[in-house]
Amino acid sequence: MRYLTDTVALVRYLRQSSQLGKQARQILQEATAGQHTVFISALNLMEILYLAQAKRITVNLMQVLEIISNQPNLVLVPIDANVVLAAATVDDVPELHDRILVGTAKYLQVPILTCDRIISQSRHVQAIWE
């Protein structure tokens, strides 16, 4: 299977946080074991950079990039014209960053690992958490 992760799920997984949903944790564990592909948006990297610089998370950008480079089933996805066009069709997620993530999942035709209530309620994507 293939999935997209949001920043919260990715950071909680890397920190081994108990606040990560059970299904999301299992999917991420299985991806690192080679059973699934999990896409990581370039947007996630920007958010991690911002949050690390603001000292709101303990994981930093270089650590995440190293993990991605060592895990073939964690695949970086750029924000390109295809993603922007898919995001343009998302009319039920008002926040720009969330809309880009939903657009990315829609373009890739994959569920998204997220606990975000607004994303989870979007008719454009399937959300997985618990």
Image (cartoon, rainbow, N blue to C red):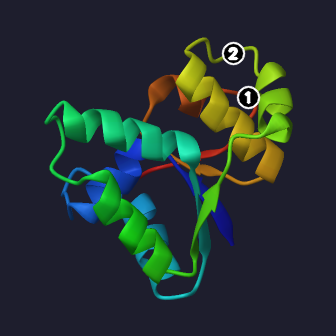
Q: Nearer the viewer, residue 2 or 59?
A: 59
| Above/below status of 59 relative to 16 | above
Q: Amino acid at mark 1?
A: Arg
**Badge 1: residue crowd in 10 Å (few <14, some 14–19, many ≥20):** few
Q: Describe the element under mark 1 as helix, strand or loop.
A: loop
- Residue 120 percent coordinates (x, y): 56, 33
Given contact means CB atoms under 8 Å apart, are the residues at marks 2 and 1 in contact?
A: yes
| Above/below status of 129 relative to 117 | below
- Residue 3 percent coordinates (x, y): 63, 60
Q: Residue at image x 69%, y 15%? A: 92
Label ID, residue 123? 1
Q: Nearer the viewer, residue 124 or 78?
A: 78
Name the side, left or right, on which 83 lies relative to 45. right
Image quarter (top left, top right, bottom left or bottom right) of the N terminus = bottom right
Sequence-wise, which precedes: disc 2 or disc 1? 2
The answer to whether any part of residue 20 appears in the image is no
- Residue 22 percent coordinates (x, y): 36, 61
Label ID, residue 55? none
Separation of disc 2 and disc 1 at Cα?
8 Å
Q: Nearer the viewer, residue 112 or 77?
A: 77
Image quadrant of residue 56?
Answer: top left
Name the side, left or right, on which 20 lies relative to 98. left
